[in-house]
Structure formats: structure tokens, C-alpha cells
């Protein structure tokens, strides 16, 4: 019998045995339908069904499986190339193994199938083990079950070792992303005492992120007394101090020879990756590293009268330059303008004097860029005049500017010269002195000490707000230097705050004025100059700047200090303070928040008996929050000098604890709105702040 016939006979016998044991239907006879193994075994074509029945219990693969055709096979977990003799010998051993199957129970065969399907061992050892277990007296089934359980246990352990680190890593990521608060985004309330108050005059104050935590820090001019035991020998020490906006801790301190008049930050250039801050005293302009306070450069000048003005690059070194107003060396009444290199801090050329006529407060200097792209410097004493930056450069350096943009002049502005030979251009001149002049740009009043290029570009292209004659406000259009509107008011004592009260897209104005022991706060429409809102308070004159802060509602929230509202309808637990009583008791100053959505309601954020002298707003974009920074004077016992107190307060946190004060009526015509407490609380709880 040849090999093919032999294989066919063996397959037929095995198929018959398996069919009887498993009671599988086979080929039927003519009438009874009995299975004919010989007929099927002698069939010439070896169907896929035969391969499946015969080979699946052995190794789970077809005869010509995924390993390809030919003599290369995968058998019982071992791969190799077998010749015909080896294949025949293995099949003879397999025939002997399969002859025993019919004598075993169905359960034993099922166990063997499962064991051989999941186990991937060496073929020789597997065959022997299987034969021995099946030939033993009832021990084969228990051994197979034990191996199967061990294998399952091993797979379970492997899955656990894989899944546990994966789940742990996922939880750690989620915890860091959502549950752990961002430390640099936290705004905490803190208070710091720094030296002598030095009266009620406002100190130098600036905001800038100097420690790289994305929160604007506080830079302040400080005056302190030496620690000498004898009072007559004590002297003052002047310095500039940088405080962390998050904790209030001192980041650095720079001792100065004179009182610090102004601090400005934000000057950037490639040689200094850290922000550059300018510390300005009466005779020194010093540039320091904003992160460390280390001195970078300094220039000695005579009688500095203004802050530094950021100019376009005059020298072609890709760094903006500076301009500052001084009095000349001979101490005449003429004002001088001095150019300073933004890169080296050195003086450029010589000071340029101007014979400014007029009296009153120094206005400017401010940089303005016309629609033609020409640069002019605005300044004046009680009035406003303009000087071409080109003329200043030529007179200071004795040559024409290198950059073409500096050479441009605007024909419309040049027509307003006093005379053909004069370098001064009249912008505003009247019988009443100008008290304030500021660009009509949101945020200018809150941090006007910034040397950021983008912010200063916005300031230099806007219209202006004029406060003159103590009681008049006007918007001056930069296109044709004409007044857009004028509003008459009682004496105004603080610089107005600019923000959106209504939804016409034009900035509105909040300001305060006081007379006869009554302070009145008013909001003026920036488009028409009409009164939008007003309220009266029991309060003597307070010279403290108001603030306007952009909110998520699209309108601004206005902040101002006052005392008890005169027409406020207090809760039963509160007592209305009469004017006479207020004069006898210590004056309590309160910080109020006004939002245009509820004009008949004020939110009282905090109160203090300290005298606040200046304030600023620091934004935290990640938290959509803002810190309100105040610098106050606090009396001390035993006739000691008052101390200076710096406070930082999160506005969103203050709102959650704020007290609602109903005004009862609004200055705007119409029926007063009386919203419910639930509605008001819900609105303010969702209120957030954003940068202007």
C-alpha cells in the first residue's frame, strides 16, 4: 500500500471513530442514511472539512494554514522544514494516538482539545504528556484542568500587571489636569507693610510680570527710616521694591539716592531676555533687570519732570528709544526734551528746550501718530501743544533722521503752526487750564506706566479726553483737532476711568467730584456726553483714581471708593449713617463695584479706615480673575509716622463675600429696576474678568 492509500485508510478509520463517538452526521446510504467512512476516505479530493475535523484538535491550524504551502509547517508550537520521511513517521505516531480516542469519554476528549489548543509547547513533550495523561487511570482530566487553571491564572496576572500601571498613569494625568489647582494661577489676598507713608501723596506704582509666573507683580517706590536709636540722627532711605503678586513677598529691592518718582516696565530688546524696568528719580533715569533688580544702565539728568515716553526706533538698532521732559541746566522756565537710547541708556545728542507759554499742570509728554504716519509729541503747561518728532531729532542730533518714518510730517497738522518759523502747533488753548489729558483707550488709566510696544501703539492713535477748567470734560478728535462734545460738571478731582457702560461700542467715563461734604459719582456717555448714571455719597473729598475693568458680559465693571450712599436702602441689620454722625466717627471708606446690568445696585467689596492713595488692577488670564491693588496710609499709635500698606485682593473672591447695596433709584430716566436677591447673586457669581 502506498503512502497516499495508507493515509486515506487511516483517515477513514479515524473519521468513523470520531463520528460514532461524537454522533456527527456523515455520508448517508441509499435509504437509511448511514455513514460510509470508506467512501469518504477513498475520495480523491481532500476537502477543507476533512482538514478541519482532523487537524483542529491537534494544533488549531489547517493543513495549509497561514504559514503558507509546501513542506514548511507549524506543528504543536515548533516550526521547521520537514521531509517526507519525517512527516510519515509523525503521522504514524499520530494514528496510534488517535486509535485510543474512541475508548475515552467525551469529556476527556474535550479536555484534551482545550489543552492542546491553548498550550504552545515543544511538540515531543506535548504528545507524550497527552498520551500519558489519557492512558492513566482517570488522572488525565485532572491534570489538564490544573494546567488550564494555571494558564488562566498566569494570563490574569499578566493582564493585571499591564492594566494597573495604565490605569494609574491615566488617573495621575487626570488629577494633574483637572483636580490639582494651578499654583501660579491662584490669586490670594495678602497685605504687606512697607516703610513710611510719607503723607497722602501717591507713590510710584507699576504692574509687570517680573518673575515669570504669568501674573503681573507690583513695583513700588518705598521710603523708610534708618534704625538709628537717636531720632535726630535718623535719615530716610529710598528704594524701589518688587512684590510677588501671588504672595506679596519681596522679590528684589533697589536702593536709590532719591525718592522714586516713577516706575515703568516692559521695555524689551534681544540683549536682555528679561523685562527692563525704568526707575526714575529727580535727577536719575536708571534701567534695571526686572527679574533681579540688577542695574543695567543709568543716566544723570537735571530736574526730571515727567515719565519716559516710548518712541519708535530712532537709531536703527531695532530697540525703541525714549524721551523725557526736564528743566534745562540754567533752571529757566523753558522745558527741555531729552532723547535716551533704549538699548544703552545713553543720552542721544543734547536736550532740546522749548519756550512753553501758559501756567498750570504739566500735560504730557505723549506720543501721537497721525493718520499720515507722522509722529508728534503732545505737551504743555495748562494747554496742549504739539512738536514734530522729526524737529526734535534734528535739533538734538544736528542731522536728519536715518529712518524714513521719522521724517514724515502731516500737512494738516503743519497748517496749525503758530507762525511759519515756530516749531509749536496749537492743539488746545483756552482760558481754562487743562487738568488731565489722556488717550481715549480702555486700560490706559489702570497701568499707564507700561512700556509695552503694542499698548503704546494703541495709545498713540486714539482720540483724547480733556478735563479742563476743573469742571469740564471734552472729547477731542485727533483727525481735525475739534471737540466732539463737552460736559459741564462740579469740580472734578480724579482722573476719569474709561469703560463700556452701554452697548454702543464707545468707551464711557466714570469720574468723581465732591463739594459740601457730598461726593457724587457719575458715568458719562462717550458718544454724546450725556449723563448715564449718578449716585451721591456721604464723603469728604477723596483724590483717588477710579478703575474700569472689562468683564465676561462684554460691559465694564467700575470700581470706586466712597462712604455711605445717601439714598441707599439698607437692610434691617444695617444702620444708615447720617452726615453728622459720619463726621464724628472714624471715616470708613468702602470699595464699591458698579455693573451696568444692575444700575440700581452697588456691590460693597471691602471697607477700611485706612486712607487709600493709589490703586491698580492686575489681571490673571488663566483664572479669568483680577487682583485689585491698593496702596494706603495707616495711622500708628504714639505719634509715630503712618505706615504704608500694600494690599492685594481677588475680585472674584471679594464678589462672593460682597454685600448688596440698593440705591433705590438711578440717575438715568425711567422706572427703577428692582431685581431679586437670587437674580443678582446668580449674575455676580458667574461674573469673570478679562484683559482690556
Image: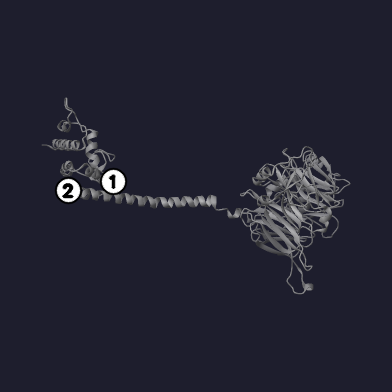
Residue 2 placement: quadrant: top left
Q: Is residue 178 above or below residue 238?
A: above
Would residue 58 be found to the left or right of residue 516 on screen? left
According to the picture, the residue beneath numbered tag 1 turns out to be 118
Would residue 69 be found to the left or right of residue 469 on screen? left
- One can see residue 195 in this view: yes
- Please name whichever residue, 413 or 365, is drawn nearer the observer in this view of the structure: 365
Q: How many marks?
A: 2
Identity of the residue furthest to the bottom in this view: 230
According to the picture, the residue beneath numbered tag 2 turns out to be 135
Image x and y of residue 30, in percent: 16, 25
Image x and y of residue 45, in percent: 20, 31
C-alpha span from label 2 to label 1: 21 Å
Image x and y of residue 118, in percent: 28, 46
Identity of the residue furthest to the right in this view: 431
| Helix, strand or loop at mark 1 | helix
- Please name whichever residue, 372 or 141, is drawn nearer the observer in this view of the structure: 141
- Please name whichever residue, 156 or 416, is drawn nearer the observer in this view of the structure: 156
Contact between labelled residues 1 and 2, with CB atoms less than 8 Å apart? no
The answer to which of marks 2 and 1 sits earlier in the sequence is 1
Q: What mark, if any, has residue 264 been given in the picture?
A: none
- One can see residue 404 in this view: no
Q: Residue at x 82, y 56 (%)?
A: 581
Residue 190 placement: quadrant: bottom right
Amino acid at each position: 500500500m502506498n503512502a497516499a492509500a495508507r493515509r486515506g485508510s487511516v483517515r477513514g478509520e479515524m473519521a468513523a471513530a470520531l463520528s460514532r463517538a461524537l454522533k456527527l452526521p456523515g455520508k448517508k446510504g441509499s435509504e437509511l442514511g448511514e455513514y460510509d467512512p470508506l467512501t469518504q476516505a477513498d475520495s480523491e479530493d481532500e476537502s477543507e472539512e476533512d482538514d478541519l475535523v482532523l487537524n483542529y484538535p491537534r494544533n488549531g491550524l489547517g493543513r495549509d494554514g497561514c504559514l503558507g504551502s509546501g513542506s514548511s509547517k507549524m506543528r504543536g508550537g515548533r516550526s521547521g522544514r520537514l521531509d517526507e520521511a519525517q512527516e510519515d513517521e509523525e503521522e504514524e505516531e499520530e494514528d496510534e494516538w488517535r486509535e485510543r480516542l474512541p475508548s475515552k469519554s467525551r469529556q476527556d476528549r474535550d479536555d484534551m482539545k482545550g489543552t492542546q489548543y491553548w498550550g504552545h509547547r515543544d511538540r515531543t513533550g506535548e504528545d507524550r504528556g497527552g498520551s500519558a495523561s489519557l492512558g492513566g487511570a482517570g488522572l488525565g482530566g485532572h491534570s489538564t484542568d490544573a494546567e488550564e487553571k494555571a494558564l488562566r491564572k498566569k494570563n490574569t496576572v499578566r493582564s493585571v500587571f499591564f492594566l494597573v500601571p495604565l490605569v494609574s498613569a491615566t488617573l495621575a494625568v487626570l488629577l494633574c489636569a483637572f483636580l490639582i489647582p494651578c499654583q501660579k494661577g491662584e490669586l490670594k489676598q495678602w497685605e504687606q507693610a512697607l516703610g513710611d507713608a510719607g503723607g497722602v501723596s501717591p507713590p510710584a506704582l507699576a504692574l509687570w510680570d517680573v518673575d515669570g509666573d504669568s501674573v503681573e507683580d507690583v513695583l513700588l517706590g518705598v521710603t523708610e527710616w534708618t534704625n538709628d536709636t537717636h531720632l535726630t540722627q535718623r535719615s530716610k532711605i529710598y528704594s524701589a521694591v518688587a512684590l510677588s503678586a501671588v504672595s506679596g513677598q519681596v522679590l528684589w529691592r533697589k536702593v536709590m539716592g532719591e525718592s522714586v518718582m516713577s516706575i515703568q516696565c516692559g521695555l524689551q530688546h534681544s540683549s536682555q531676555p528679561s523685562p527692563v524696568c525704568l526707575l526714575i528719580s529727580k535727577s536719575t533715569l536708571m534701567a534695571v533687570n526686572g527679574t533681579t533688580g540688577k542695574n543695567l544702565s543709568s543716566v544723570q539728568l537735571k530736574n526730571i519732570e515727567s515719565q519716559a515716553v516710548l518712541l519708535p526706533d530712532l537709531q536703527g538698532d531695532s530697540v525703541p528709544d525714549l524721551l523725557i521732559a526736564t528743566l534745562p541746566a540754567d533752571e529757566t522756565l523753558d522745558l527741555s526734551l531729552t532723547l535716551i537710547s533704549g538699548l544703552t541708556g545713553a543720552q542721544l545728542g543734547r536736550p532740546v528746550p522749548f519756550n512753553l507759554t501758559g501756567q498750570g499742570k504739566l500735560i504730557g509728554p505723549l506720543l501721537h501718530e497721525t493718520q499720515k504716519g507722522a509722529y508728534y509729541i503732545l505737551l504743555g503747561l495748562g494747554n496742549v501743544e504739539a512738536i514734530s518728532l522729526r524737529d526734535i531729532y534734528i535739533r538734538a542730533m544736528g542731522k536728519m533722521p536715518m529712518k524714513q518714518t521719522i521724517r514724515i510730517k502731516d500737512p494738516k497738522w503743519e497748517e496749525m503752526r503758530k507762525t511759519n518759523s515756530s516749531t509749536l502747533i496749537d492743539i488746545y488753548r483756552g482760558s481754562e487750564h487743562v487738568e488731565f489729558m489722556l488717550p481715549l483707550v480702555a486700560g490706559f488709566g489702570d497701568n499707564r506706566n507700561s512700556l509695552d510696544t503694542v499698548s503704546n501703539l494703541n495709545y498713540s492713535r486714539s482720540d483724547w479726553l480733556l478735563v479742563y477748567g476743573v469742571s469740564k470734560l471734552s472729547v477731542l478728535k485727533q483727525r481735525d483737532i475739534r471737540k466732539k462734545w463737552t460736559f459741564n460738571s462740579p469740580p472734578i478731582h480724579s482722573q476719569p476711568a474709561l469703560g463700556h457702560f452701554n452697548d454702543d461700542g464707545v468707551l464711557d467715563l466714570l469720574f468723581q467730584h465732591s463739594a459740601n461734604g457730598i461726593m457724587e459719582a457719575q458715568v458719562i456717555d462717550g458718544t454724546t456726553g450725556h449723563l448715564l448714571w449718578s449716585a451721591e455719597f456721604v464723603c469728604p473729598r477723596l483724590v483717588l483714581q477710579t478703575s474700569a475693568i472689562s468683564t465676561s458680559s462684554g460691559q465694564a465693571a467700575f470700581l470706586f471708593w466712597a462712604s455711605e450712599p445717601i439714598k441707599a436702602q439698607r437692610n434691617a441689620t444695617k444702620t444708615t449713617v447720617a452726615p453728622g454722625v459720619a463726621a464724628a466717627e472714624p471715616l470708613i471708606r468702602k470699595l464699591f463695584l458698579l455693573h451696568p446690568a444692575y444700575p440700581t445696585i452697588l456691590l460693597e467689596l471691602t471697607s477700611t479706615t485706612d486712607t487709600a492713595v493709589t490703586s491698580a488692577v492686575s489681571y490673571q488670564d488663566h483664572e479669568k480673575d483680577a487682583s485689585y491693588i491698593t496702596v494706603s496710609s495707616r495711622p500708628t499709635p504714639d505719634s509715630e509716622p503712618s505706615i504704608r500698606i500694600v494690599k492685594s485682593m481677588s475680585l472674584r473672591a471679594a464678589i462672593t463675600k460682597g454685600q448688596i447695596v440698593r440705591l433705590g433709584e438711578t440717575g438715568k430716566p425711567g422706572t427703577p429696576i428692582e431685581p431679586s436677591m437670587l437674580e443678582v447673586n446668580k449674575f455676580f457669581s458667574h461674573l469673570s474678568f478679562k484683559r482690556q
